Amino acid sequence: MKKTLAIILAFTMITGLCACGGSQDSGKGEDSTVKTTQNDAQEDAGDTKSKESPENADSATSGGEVNLRILLQETSAESVEAAIAPYLEQHPNVKVELVKSPDFVAMNQNAIAAHQANDDYDLITVNHVDTLAYVKGEIIQPIEEFAKADGINYEDIIFNSLLEQGKSDGQLYAIPINTGTRVLAVNKELFEKYGQKYPETQKEMLEAAAALARDGNFGFVNSMCRNSYVPTYEQGVFLMGNGGRLYEIEDGHPVAKIDTQEMKDFLNFNVELLKYMPKDCLTMTEDDGRKAFATGNVGMYVFGPWEYSLMPEVDFTCELVKIPSGTKEQASTSGGFQMAIGSGTKNPGEAWNLLKYITTTPEAMASMAATDLPTMEEAYKVAPYTDKKYDIFREQLETAYLAGIPVPNLNEVSEDFFSYWTDVLYGKISVDEACTKAQESVQKLLDKNK
């Protein structure tokens, strides 16, 4: 059984992974006594696990030395060290080893290998698009009972729109530790030069883009085809504004929402927007798009908080505004990372205590955010999130949602829709035809999850 689950997880979690948020690189690290190591894949070692109930889980806090391992991406290690340093000072009997993976593919492989070897990590960092695969593979365990036993109500702590990321069948499995939402960056000089106001609707955005696209300038830039998550996350902010999603959950099952007016409006908007974009926007990398905006001859760019650390220096005034509204509302997308307890941890009580500290302490959550955003209101009272430059993102989070509740084969679903997205942008297929064909194709993939 465990071998089968590993094969399923390897297929669904290792292909086409995307953070769907920002860079996890951070300069917020502090000196600590946390031990770090580079993880090697473990061997498959049978099928037996010993689990401890929450009622008996606190035995690790009796004073004996406890060793916890946290699986994470290498670039987030400094942020985690800074977040847990105060906890380790208060609990000298707890030793933490940060097991660093170079990327998400390796991190998922390590989680699977450890689970197969009955050597699960105590705490695991999970990309939100992979959460359900971890749940179905029984790599992480529910934490509802731990929270109830300690009187923790995460709905009073974590932004509820993000909390859904870590749930399955009503059970809470993982807590969002950071998020990334998007706003619109505008080149103030170009807007003033051509007498344009900042757009509040998608219609106004197209009008502004058309007015700016002259004299060697462009209205908008994005790397439109860099990966399969662009249509649902980066450009997906405009789909959300139309009230659309790639799929919705109905009666417990995912149902494709592609052959809809909301999706057609979204695709037509992007086809029109292409007219005012650089010619190479369909082939450029993410960094190419960022650099193109930084040149000063592009009017608008979708901007996440991670851009503060990645955007080249510009010699024009860049202002941030909320994403222009679509036919239904003003909205944006969110994503991010979570932390969960390994299903086979030998120290469930202490793993929970550390997780509880991280996810209920504003200072810890501010550190965990790295170059993204905290997932709790109180963390915005902690530096650096007290800086006014984060105000627009906190405001945008009020109407920022998951592009879709994750399904185990989300990567496969996203890749399938992406093929129609690229065909539409390259003019190989009409919007109406793409919506009809993609509806049927994506639904077949979603039906695998029943």
Image (tube, rainbow, N blue to C red):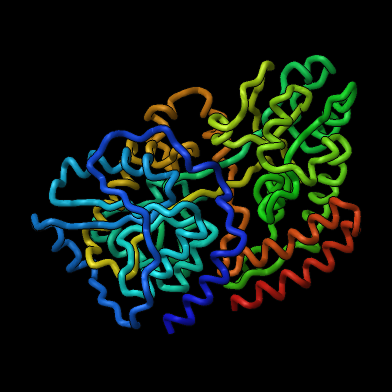
The foreground one among 187 and 325 is 187
Kindly identify the residue that appears in the image at 41 percent across and 65 percent down: 111
In the rendered image, the vertical position of residue 355 relative to residue 171, given as above or below: above
Farthest residue to the left: give it: 63
Image quadrant where one finds the N terminus: bottom left
143 vs 374, left or right, is left
Farthest residue to the bottom: give it: 1
The foreground one among 420 and 378 is 420
In the rendered image, the vertical position of residue 401 relative to residue 273, given as above or below: below
* Percent position of residue 69, x then y: 29, 57
* Percent position of residue 233, x then y: 65, 49
In the rendered image, the vertical position of residue 226 relative to residue 370, given as above or below: below
Kindly identify the residue that appears in the image at 47 percent across and 69 percent down: 169
* Percent position of residue 295, x then y: 73, 24
Kindly identify the residue that appears in the image at 37 percent across and 37 percent down: 367
Q: Look at the image and tell me whether residue 44 can be seen.
A: yes
Q: How many numbered marks appear?
A: 0
